[in-house]
Image: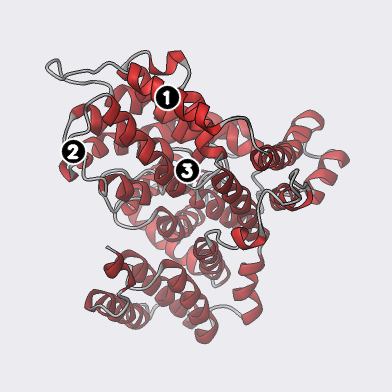
Amino acid sequence: MAYAEDDSTSSPSLAGFVAGLGVFLAVYFLASGLEDRQRMVAATFAGAVILWMTEALPLAMTAMLSTAALVVTGGLSTKEAFGAYGDQIILLFVGSFIIAKSMEENGLDRRIAFWLLAKPRATRSASSTLLVLGIVACLISLFVSNTATTAMLLPIGLTILREIGVLHRGNPIANSYLLMLTWGSSIAVGTIIGTPPNVIGVGMIRDAAGVNINFVTWAVFAMPITILMLLFAWFQLSRWKMDTYVPNTDEAHEYAREQLRGLGRLRDGERITLIAFAVAIVFWLLPGSIEYIFGPASPTTKWWTDRFPEAIAALLGAAVLFILPCKDGTRALSWRQATRIEWGTILLFAGGLALGKATLDSGLAKAIGDSVAQTVGSGSVWTITGIATALAIILSELASNTASANIVVPVAIALAQGSGVDIVPPALGATIGANLGFMLPISTAPNAIVYSSGIVPANVMLRAGVWFDVAGFLVTMLCLRIFLPLLGLA
Protein backbone atom coordinates (compact mmCIF):
# COMPACT_ATOMS: atom_id res chain seq x y z
CA MET A 1 0.00 0.00 0.00
CA ALA A 2 2.80 2.41 0.80
CA TYR A 3 4.29 1.94 -2.63
CA ALA A 4 1.04 2.82 -4.31
CA GLU A 5 0.63 5.94 -2.24
CA ASP A 6 4.20 7.08 -2.81
CA ASP A 7 4.20 6.43 -6.52
CA SER A 8 3.33 9.88 -7.78
CA THR A 9 4.53 9.15 -11.30
CA SER A 10 2.26 6.20 -11.97
CA SER A 11 0.32 6.15 -15.24
CA PRO A 12 -3.12 6.54 -13.60
CA SER A 13 -1.95 9.81 -12.02
CA LEU A 14 -0.55 11.07 -15.31
CA ALA A 15 -3.70 10.01 -17.15
CA GLY A 16 -5.86 11.81 -14.58
CA PHE A 17 -3.78 14.98 -14.91
CA VAL A 18 -4.05 14.87 -18.70
CA ALA A 19 -7.81 14.32 -18.36
CA GLY A 20 -8.07 17.35 -16.07
CA LEU A 21 -6.13 19.49 -18.54
CA GLY A 22 -8.28 18.19 -21.39
CA VAL A 23 -11.49 19.04 -19.54
CA PHE A 24 -10.10 22.52 -18.76
CA LEU A 25 -9.55 23.19 -22.47
CA ALA A 26 -12.82 21.57 -23.52
CA VAL A 27 -14.91 23.62 -21.11
CA TYR A 28 -13.15 26.84 -22.11
CA PHE A 29 -13.86 26.34 -25.82
CA LEU A 30 -17.38 24.94 -25.36
CA ALA A 31 -18.49 27.72 -22.99
CA SER A 32 -18.21 30.36 -25.69
CA GLY A 33 -21.53 31.89 -24.66
CA LEU A 34 -20.07 33.08 -21.35
CA GLU A 35 -17.95 36.14 -20.70
CA ASP A 36 -14.21 35.53 -20.96
CA ARG A 37 -13.63 35.70 -17.20
CA GLN A 38 -16.51 33.32 -16.56
CA ARG A 39 -15.12 30.87 -19.14
CA MET A 40 -11.75 30.88 -17.38
CA VAL A 41 -13.32 30.26 -13.98
CA ALA A 42 -15.58 27.52 -15.39
CA ALA A 43 -12.63 25.81 -17.06
CA THR A 44 -10.52 26.01 -13.89
CA PHE A 45 -13.40 24.69 -11.79
CA ALA A 46 -14.05 21.77 -14.17
CA GLY A 47 -10.37 20.84 -14.35
CA ALA A 48 -10.13 20.86 -10.54
CA VAL A 49 -13.20 18.61 -10.32
CA ILE A 50 -11.57 16.02 -12.58
CA LEU A 51 -8.32 16.12 -10.63
CA TRP A 52 -10.19 15.76 -7.34
CA MET A 53 -12.28 12.84 -8.59
CA THR A 54 -9.36 10.97 -10.16
CA GLU A 55 -6.97 11.93 -7.35
CA ALA A 56 -4.32 12.42 -10.03
CA LEU A 57 -2.63 14.83 -7.64
CA PRO A 58 -2.87 15.10 -3.86
CA LEU A 59 -6.12 16.90 -3.07
CA ALA A 60 -4.33 19.83 -1.45
CA MET A 61 -2.03 20.19 -4.47
CA THR A 62 -5.05 20.33 -6.76
CA ALA A 63 -6.59 23.04 -4.58
CA MET A 64 -3.41 25.15 -4.68
CA LEU A 65 -2.98 24.57 -8.41
CA SER A 66 -6.57 25.71 -9.02
CA THR A 67 -5.85 28.89 -7.02
CA ALA A 68 -2.76 29.54 -9.14
CA ALA A 69 -4.80 28.91 -12.29
CA LEU A 70 -7.40 31.48 -11.19
CA VAL A 71 -4.66 34.09 -10.94
CA VAL A 72 -2.95 33.14 -14.22
CA THR A 73 -6.23 33.10 -16.18
CA GLY A 74 -7.56 36.29 -14.64
CA GLY A 75 -10.36 34.58 -12.75
CA LEU A 76 -9.34 36.38 -9.54
CA SER A 77 -6.74 38.94 -8.64
CA THR A 78 -3.69 37.76 -6.73
CA LYS A 79 -4.90 39.41 -3.54
CA GLU A 80 -8.40 37.91 -3.80
CA ALA A 81 -7.22 34.42 -4.72
CA PHE A 82 -4.58 34.03 -2.02
CA GLY A 83 -6.63 36.01 0.47
CA ALA A 84 -8.70 32.83 0.87
CA TYR A 85 -5.69 31.23 2.57
CA GLY A 86 -5.88 33.85 5.31
CA ASP A 87 -9.62 33.54 5.83
CA GLN A 88 -10.69 33.26 9.48
CA ILE A 89 -12.09 29.81 8.70
CA ILE A 90 -8.57 28.57 8.00
CA LEU A 91 -7.47 29.67 11.47
CA LEU A 92 -10.57 28.03 12.92
CA PHE A 93 -9.33 24.71 11.62
CA VAL A 94 -5.73 25.35 12.62
CA GLY A 95 -6.81 25.89 16.23
CA SER A 96 -9.26 22.99 16.19
CA PHE A 97 -6.73 20.60 14.66
CA ILE A 98 -4.13 21.53 17.28
CA ILE A 99 -6.58 20.71 20.09
CA ALA A 100 -7.49 17.45 18.34
CA LYS A 101 -3.80 16.59 17.98
CA SER A 102 -3.34 17.11 21.72
CA MET A 103 -6.23 14.74 22.42
CA GLU A 104 -4.55 12.15 20.24
CA GLU A 105 -1.01 12.64 21.57
CA ASN A 106 -2.10 12.54 25.21
CA GLY A 107 -4.47 9.59 24.77
CA LEU A 108 -7.54 11.51 25.89
CA ASP A 109 -9.58 10.22 22.97
CA ARG A 110 -8.84 6.59 23.90
CA ARG A 111 -9.67 7.28 27.56
CA ILE A 112 -13.07 8.69 26.56
CA ALA A 113 -13.80 5.68 24.36
CA PHE A 114 -12.86 3.13 27.03
CA TRP A 115 -14.70 5.08 29.73
CA LEU A 116 -17.95 4.85 27.79
CA LEU A 117 -17.49 1.19 26.87
CA ALA A 118 -16.70 0.33 30.49
CA LYS A 119 -20.18 1.38 31.58
CA PRO A 120 -22.29 -1.71 32.43
CA ARG A 121 -25.23 -0.65 30.29
CA ALA A 122 -22.95 -0.04 27.33
CA THR A 123 -22.14 -3.73 26.97
CA ARG A 124 -25.37 -5.23 28.29
CA SER A 125 -26.01 -6.83 24.89
CA ALA A 126 -24.56 -6.95 21.38
CA SER A 127 -27.11 -4.36 20.33
CA SER A 128 -26.30 -1.94 23.16
CA THR A 129 -22.57 -2.29 22.46
CA LEU A 130 -23.27 -1.47 18.82
CA LEU A 131 -25.09 1.70 19.84
CA VAL A 132 -22.32 2.76 22.22
CA LEU A 133 -19.69 2.28 19.52
CA GLY A 134 -21.71 4.60 17.32
CA ILE A 135 -22.13 7.15 20.11
CA VAL A 136 -18.40 7.08 20.91
CA ALA A 137 -17.45 7.52 17.25
CA CYS A 138 -20.00 10.29 16.80
CA LEU A 139 -19.08 12.22 19.96
CA ILE A 140 -15.36 12.21 19.18
CA SER A 141 -15.94 13.04 15.51
CA LEU A 142 -17.98 16.13 16.43
CA PHE A 143 -14.64 17.75 17.30
CA VAL A 144 -11.98 15.49 15.77
CA SER A 145 -11.70 14.55 12.08
CA ASN A 146 -13.76 11.51 11.09
CA THR A 147 -10.64 9.95 9.59
CA ALA A 148 -8.68 10.23 12.84
CA THR A 149 -11.69 9.02 14.83
CA THR A 150 -12.15 5.89 12.73
CA ALA A 151 -8.43 5.14 12.66
CA MET A 152 -8.31 5.43 16.46
CA LEU A 153 -11.43 3.33 17.09
CA LEU A 154 -10.82 0.56 14.54
CA PRO A 155 -8.28 -1.32 16.71
CA ILE A 156 -10.68 -1.04 19.64
CA GLY A 157 -13.55 -2.36 17.53
CA LEU A 158 -11.46 -5.26 16.22
CA THR A 159 -10.37 -6.15 19.74
CA ILE A 160 -13.99 -6.19 20.93
CA LEU A 161 -14.94 -8.45 18.02
CA ARG A 162 -12.07 -10.77 18.84
CA GLU A 163 -13.07 -10.89 22.51
CA ILE A 164 -16.64 -11.88 21.67
CA GLY A 165 -15.52 -14.42 19.07
CA VAL A 166 -16.93 -12.96 15.84
CA LEU A 167 -13.81 -11.53 14.18
CA HIS A 168 -14.46 -13.25 10.85
CA ARG A 169 -14.82 -11.81 7.36
CA GLY A 170 -18.46 -11.31 6.46
CA ASN A 171 -19.79 -12.14 9.93
CA PRO A 172 -23.04 -10.15 10.34
CA ILE A 173 -22.11 -8.90 13.83
CA ALA A 174 -18.62 -7.91 12.68
CA ASN A 175 -20.07 -6.13 9.64
CA SER A 176 -22.47 -4.17 11.82
CA TYR A 177 -19.86 -3.13 14.40
CA LEU A 178 -17.34 -1.91 11.84
CA LEU A 179 -19.92 -0.17 9.68
CA MET A 180 -21.16 1.58 12.81
CA LEU A 181 -17.64 2.92 13.38
CA THR A 182 -17.42 4.49 9.94
CA TRP A 183 -21.03 5.69 9.86
CA GLY A 184 -20.87 7.07 13.40
CA SER A 185 -17.74 9.04 12.50
CA SER A 186 -19.15 10.39 9.24
CA ILE A 187 -22.60 11.53 10.44
CA ALA A 188 -21.15 13.89 13.05
CA VAL A 189 -22.38 17.01 11.24
CA GLY A 190 -23.80 18.56 14.41
CA THR A 191 -20.98 21.07 14.86
CA ILE A 192 -19.46 23.48 12.35
CA ILE A 193 -16.03 21.95 12.93
CA GLY A 194 -17.36 18.37 12.81
CA THR A 195 -16.49 17.89 9.14
CA PRO A 196 -14.59 19.89 6.50
CA PRO A 197 -17.66 20.44 4.26
CA ASN A 198 -19.42 22.26 7.12
CA VAL A 199 -16.71 24.89 7.26
CA ILE A 200 -16.63 25.20 3.47
CA GLY A 201 -20.40 25.64 3.31
CA VAL A 202 -20.50 28.24 6.08
CA GLY A 203 -17.76 30.23 4.37
CA MET A 204 -19.45 30.18 0.98
CA ILE A 205 -22.83 31.14 2.46
CA ARG A 206 -21.20 34.04 4.28
CA ASP A 207 -19.51 35.24 1.08
CA ALA A 208 -22.56 34.80 -1.14
CA ALA A 209 -25.37 36.00 1.13
CA GLY A 210 -23.68 37.80 4.01
CA VAL A 211 -25.28 35.33 6.44
CA ASN A 212 -23.08 34.30 9.37
CA ILE A 213 -24.10 30.96 10.86
CA ASN A 214 -22.64 30.64 14.35
CA PHE A 215 -21.84 27.55 16.39
CA VAL A 216 -25.16 27.48 18.25
CA THR A 217 -27.36 28.18 15.21
CA TRP A 218 -25.64 25.41 13.27
CA ALA A 219 -26.15 22.94 16.12
CA VAL A 220 -29.89 23.71 16.31
CA PHE A 221 -30.60 22.31 12.83
CA ALA A 222 -27.63 19.97 12.35
CA MET A 223 -27.50 18.13 15.68
CA PRO A 224 -30.96 16.62 15.08
CA ILE A 225 -29.63 15.26 11.78
CA THR A 226 -26.73 13.62 13.61
CA ILE A 227 -28.99 12.14 16.31
CA LEU A 228 -31.60 10.80 13.87
CA MET A 229 -28.95 9.33 11.57
CA LEU A 230 -27.27 7.63 14.53
CA LEU A 231 -30.56 6.09 15.63
CA PHE A 232 -31.32 4.96 12.07
CA ALA A 233 -27.85 3.41 11.81
CA TRP A 234 -28.45 1.50 15.03
CA PHE A 235 -31.87 0.34 13.83
CA GLN A 236 -30.52 -0.76 10.46
CA LEU A 237 -27.34 -2.45 11.65
CA SER A 238 -28.87 -4.26 14.65
CA ARG A 239 -31.48 -6.07 12.57
CA TRP A 240 -29.60 -9.35 12.43
CA LYS A 241 -31.16 -12.41 10.83
CA MET A 242 -32.82 -14.94 13.08
CA ASP A 243 -30.09 -17.52 12.45
CA THR A 244 -27.27 -15.10 13.30
CA TYR A 245 -25.25 -16.07 16.34
CA VAL A 246 -25.46 -13.12 18.76
CA PRO A 247 -22.54 -13.40 21.21
CA ASN A 248 -22.25 -12.47 24.85
CA THR A 249 -20.59 -9.06 25.29
CA ASP A 250 -19.33 -9.42 28.84
CA GLU A 251 -15.80 -9.88 27.47
CA ALA A 252 -15.96 -6.49 25.71
CA HIS A 253 -16.98 -4.86 28.97
CA GLU A 254 -14.09 -6.47 30.84
CA TYR A 255 -11.65 -5.49 28.08
CA ALA A 256 -12.68 -1.84 28.29
CA ARG A 257 -12.41 -1.87 32.10
CA GLU A 258 -8.92 -3.40 31.94
CA GLN A 259 -7.75 -0.86 29.37
CA LEU A 260 -9.20 1.99 31.43
CA ARG A 261 -7.47 0.73 34.58
CA GLY A 262 -4.24 0.48 32.61
CA LEU A 263 -4.46 4.14 31.68
CA GLY A 264 -4.41 5.08 35.36
CA ARG A 265 -5.44 8.47 36.69
CA LEU A 266 -5.93 11.47 34.45
CA ARG A 267 -2.47 12.72 33.45
CA ASP A 268 -1.41 16.36 33.33
CA GLY A 269 -1.44 16.44 29.54
CA GLU A 270 -4.97 15.06 29.41
CA ARG A 271 -6.17 17.48 32.08
CA ILE A 272 -4.74 20.50 30.28
CA THR A 273 -6.19 19.27 26.99
CA LEU A 274 -9.61 19.07 28.63
CA ILE A 275 -9.20 22.65 29.87
CA ALA A 276 -8.18 23.81 26.38
CA PHE A 277 -11.15 22.01 24.87
CA ALA A 278 -13.50 23.56 27.44
CA VAL A 279 -12.15 27.06 26.73
CA ALA A 280 -12.81 26.62 23.01
CA ILE A 281 -16.31 25.23 23.64
CA VAL A 282 -17.21 28.13 25.94
CA PHE A 283 -16.15 30.75 23.43
CA TRP A 284 -17.83 28.85 20.59
CA LEU A 285 -21.12 28.82 22.48
CA LEU A 286 -21.07 32.31 24.04
CA PRO A 287 -21.78 34.51 20.98
CA GLY A 288 -24.71 32.37 19.86
CA SER A 289 -26.08 32.12 23.40
CA ILE A 290 -25.85 35.89 23.87
CA GLU A 291 -27.64 36.41 20.58
CA TYR A 292 -30.52 34.24 21.73
CA ILE A 293 -30.69 36.08 25.06
CA PHE A 294 -30.33 39.70 23.91
CA GLY A 295 -31.42 39.44 20.28
CA PRO A 296 -29.37 39.79 17.07
CA ALA A 297 -29.56 43.62 17.01
CA SER A 298 -28.29 44.11 20.57
CA PRO A 299 -24.98 46.02 21.00
CA THR A 300 -23.86 43.27 23.38
CA THR A 301 -24.53 40.64 20.74
CA LYS A 302 -22.71 42.65 18.09
CA TRP A 303 -19.71 43.15 20.37
CA TRP A 304 -19.36 39.45 21.13
CA THR A 305 -19.95 38.42 17.51
CA ASP A 306 -17.37 40.87 16.20
CA ARG A 307 -14.74 40.21 18.86
CA PHE A 308 -15.05 36.42 19.29
CA PRO A 309 -15.72 34.63 16.00
CA GLU A 310 -15.22 30.84 15.93
CA ALA A 311 -11.58 31.19 14.84
CA ILE A 312 -10.69 33.20 17.94
CA ALA A 313 -12.31 30.58 20.17
CA ALA A 314 -10.27 27.78 18.57
CA LEU A 315 -7.03 29.75 18.83
CA LEU A 316 -7.65 30.67 22.48
CA GLY A 317 -8.26 27.02 23.29
CA ALA A 318 -5.15 25.93 21.41
CA ALA A 319 -3.07 28.58 23.20
CA VAL A 320 -3.95 27.03 26.57
CA LEU A 321 -1.98 23.92 25.56
CA PHE A 322 1.18 25.99 25.42
CA ILE A 323 0.46 28.31 28.37
CA LEU A 324 -0.38 25.87 31.18
CA PRO A 325 2.61 23.75 32.24
CA CYS A 326 2.55 20.15 33.35
CA LYS A 327 4.06 19.30 36.71
CA ASP A 328 7.34 18.28 35.11
CA GLY A 329 7.62 21.63 33.32
CA THR A 330 6.69 20.34 29.88
CA ARG A 331 3.58 21.34 27.93
CA ALA A 332 0.60 19.20 26.97
CA LEU A 333 1.63 19.55 23.33
CA SER A 334 5.00 20.46 21.86
CA TRP A 335 5.20 22.70 18.84
CA ARG A 336 6.81 19.86 16.90
CA GLN A 337 3.72 17.75 17.60
CA ALA A 338 1.42 20.65 16.73
CA THR A 339 3.01 21.02 13.31
CA ARG A 340 1.87 17.50 12.43
CA ILE A 341 -1.78 18.55 12.01
CA GLU A 342 -3.54 18.01 8.67
CA TRP A 343 -2.01 20.92 6.76
CA GLY A 344 -3.05 19.34 3.46
CA THR A 345 -6.68 19.44 4.54
CA ILE A 346 -6.33 23.09 5.56
CA LEU A 347 -4.86 23.99 2.15
CA LEU A 348 -7.68 22.08 0.50
CA PHE A 349 -10.24 24.23 2.36
CA ALA A 350 -8.49 27.40 1.26
CA GLY A 351 -8.39 26.36 -2.38
CA GLY A 352 -12.08 25.50 -2.25
CA LEU A 353 -12.90 28.90 -0.78
CA ALA A 354 -10.96 30.60 -3.58
CA LEU A 355 -12.85 28.62 -6.22
CA GLY A 356 -16.16 29.43 -4.58
CA LYS A 357 -15.31 33.13 -4.48
CA ALA A 358 -14.31 33.09 -8.15
CA THR A 359 -17.59 31.50 -9.25
CA LEU A 360 -19.53 34.14 -7.35
CA ASP A 361 -17.47 37.24 -8.19
CA SER A 362 -17.19 36.42 -11.88
CA GLY A 363 -20.94 35.99 -12.26
CA LEU A 364 -20.48 32.36 -13.29
CA ALA A 365 -22.62 31.15 -10.38
CA LYS A 366 -25.56 33.28 -11.47
CA ALA A 367 -25.14 32.27 -15.13
CA ILE A 368 -25.18 28.57 -14.22
CA GLY A 369 -28.13 29.10 -11.90
CA ASP A 370 -30.12 30.88 -14.59
CA SER A 371 -29.46 28.05 -17.04
CA VAL A 372 -30.27 25.22 -14.62
CA ALA A 373 -33.34 27.06 -13.34
CA GLN A 374 -34.73 27.20 -16.86
CA THR A 375 -34.04 23.49 -17.32
CA VAL A 376 -35.53 22.46 -13.98
CA GLY A 377 -38.44 24.80 -14.43
CA SER A 378 -39.12 25.22 -10.74
CA GLY A 379 -38.49 28.12 -8.43
CA SER A 380 -39.29 26.29 -5.19
CA VAL A 381 -36.53 26.69 -2.64
CA TRP A 382 -37.17 23.21 -1.25
CA THR A 383 -37.14 21.57 -4.68
CA ILE A 384 -33.76 23.17 -5.32
CA THR A 385 -32.59 22.13 -1.85
CA GLY A 386 -33.60 18.54 -2.61
CA ILE A 387 -31.72 18.58 -5.92
CA ALA A 388 -28.60 20.05 -4.29
CA THR A 389 -28.70 17.57 -1.40
CA ALA A 390 -29.15 14.55 -3.69
CA LEU A 391 -26.41 15.75 -6.04
CA ALA A 392 -23.97 16.18 -3.13
CA ILE A 393 -24.73 12.70 -1.75
CA ILE A 394 -24.24 11.09 -5.17
CA LEU A 395 -21.01 12.93 -5.87
CA SER A 396 -19.65 12.14 -2.41
CA GLU A 397 -19.73 8.46 -3.38
CA LEU A 398 -17.11 9.15 -6.05
CA ALA A 399 -15.07 11.95 -4.49
CA SER A 400 -14.04 12.94 -0.98
CA ASN A 401 -16.64 14.81 1.06
CA THR A 402 -14.45 17.91 1.01
CA ALA A 403 -14.10 17.82 -2.76
CA SER A 404 -17.85 17.21 -3.09
CA ALA A 405 -18.61 20.28 -1.00
CA ASN A 406 -16.20 22.39 -3.04
CA ILE A 407 -17.99 21.25 -6.20
CA VAL A 408 -21.67 21.18 -5.25
CA VAL A 409 -22.12 24.09 -2.81
CA PRO A 410 -21.28 26.73 -5.46
CA VAL A 411 -23.66 24.99 -7.88
CA ALA A 412 -26.41 25.01 -5.23
CA ILE A 413 -25.86 28.73 -4.62
CA ALA A 414 -25.91 29.38 -8.36
CA LEU A 415 -29.11 27.41 -8.82
CA ALA A 416 -30.83 29.30 -6.01
CA GLN A 417 -29.68 32.65 -7.37
CA GLY A 418 -30.88 31.74 -10.84
CA SER A 419 -34.29 30.83 -9.47
CA GLY A 420 -34.49 33.95 -7.33
CA VAL A 421 -34.87 32.05 -4.06
CA ASP A 422 -33.01 32.08 -0.74
CA ILE A 423 -29.59 30.48 -1.20
CA VAL A 424 -29.16 29.30 2.41
CA PRO A 425 -31.31 26.10 2.39
CA PRO A 426 -29.86 24.74 -0.91
CA ALA A 427 -26.31 25.56 0.18
CA LEU A 428 -26.84 23.86 3.54
CA GLY A 429 -28.43 20.86 1.85
CA ALA A 430 -25.38 20.51 -0.40
CA THR A 431 -23.04 21.03 2.55
CA ILE A 432 -24.59 18.32 4.70
CA GLY A 433 -25.23 16.01 1.75
CA ALA A 434 -21.53 16.05 0.93
CA ASN A 435 -20.95 14.19 4.23
CA LEU A 436 -23.47 11.44 3.54
CA GLY A 437 -21.95 9.09 0.98
CA PHE A 438 -21.63 5.61 2.52
CA MET A 439 -21.83 3.03 -0.26
CA LEU A 440 -18.28 2.49 -1.48
CA PRO A 441 -14.87 1.93 0.14
CA ILE A 442 -13.68 5.07 -1.67
CA SER A 443 -16.65 7.19 -0.60
CA THR A 444 -15.01 8.42 2.59
CA ALA A 445 -11.70 7.92 4.36
CA PRO A 446 -13.51 6.17 7.28
CA ASN A 447 -15.06 3.72 4.81
CA ALA A 448 -11.63 3.01 3.34
CA ILE A 449 -10.12 2.49 6.79
CA VAL A 450 -12.82 0.01 7.81
CA TYR A 451 -12.64 -1.78 4.45
CA SER A 452 -8.86 -2.12 4.86
CA SER A 453 -9.50 -4.40 7.87
CA GLY A 454 -10.56 -7.13 5.44
CA ILE A 455 -13.62 -7.93 7.56
CA VAL A 456 -16.38 -6.05 5.71
CA PRO A 457 -16.92 -7.19 2.08
CA ALA A 458 -17.48 -4.44 -0.50
CA ASN A 459 -20.91 -5.81 -1.48
CA VAL A 460 -22.07 -5.65 2.15
CA MET A 461 -20.90 -2.04 2.42
CA LEU A 462 -22.69 -1.24 -0.84
CA ARG A 463 -26.03 -2.80 0.11
CA ALA A 464 -26.08 -1.25 3.56
CA GLY A 465 -24.83 2.09 2.27
CA VAL A 466 -27.62 2.47 -0.29
CA TRP A 467 -30.30 2.52 2.39
CA PHE A 468 -28.23 4.77 4.61
CA ASP A 469 -27.76 7.22 1.73
CA VAL A 470 -31.53 7.34 1.23
CA ALA A 471 -32.04 7.86 4.97
CA GLY A 472 -29.47 10.66 4.92
CA PHE A 473 -31.35 12.48 2.17
CA LEU A 474 -34.73 12.17 3.89
CA VAL A 475 -33.45 13.12 7.36
CA THR A 476 -31.53 16.12 6.02
CA MET A 477 -34.51 17.44 4.09
CA LEU A 478 -36.83 16.91 7.08
CA CYS A 479 -34.59 18.72 9.57
CA LEU A 480 -33.80 21.62 7.24
CA ARG A 481 -37.49 22.02 6.42
CA ILE A 482 -38.46 22.10 10.11
CA PHE A 483 -35.64 24.11 11.70
CA LEU A 484 -34.44 26.62 9.10
CA PRO A 485 -37.74 28.57 9.03
CA LEU A 486 -37.73 28.65 12.84
CA LEU A 487 -34.21 30.10 12.76
CA GLY A 488 -35.07 32.66 10.10
CA LEU A 489 -32.74 30.99 7.60
CA ALA A 490 -35.46 30.06 5.09
Q: Would you say residue 224 is visible in this rendering?
A: no
Q: Would you say residue 140 is visible in this rendering?
A: yes
Three-letter residue code for mark 2: Val
Q: Mark 3 to mark 1: distance in Å?
A: 37 Å
How busy is the neighbourhood of tag 2: few (under 14 within 10 Å), some, or many (20 plus)?
Answer: some
How busy is the neighbourhood of tag 3: few (under 14 within 10 Å), some, or many (20 plus)?
Answer: many
Q: Mark 2 to mark 1: distance in Å?
A: 22 Å
Residue drawn 28% across the image and 25% down it: 236
| In this view, 354 is above or below 275 | below
* Mark 3 element type: helix
Residue ID for mark 2:
460
Say which label, 3 or 1, has the lower sequence index. Answer: 1
Q: Nearer the viewer, mark 3 or mark 1?
A: 1
Q: Quadrant of the N terminus?
A: bottom left
Badge number at residue 381: 3
Q: As rendered, which of 27 and 22 lies closer to the eye? A: 22
* Quarter of the rendering containing residue 9: bottom left
Say which label, 2 or 3, has the lower sequence index. Answer: 3
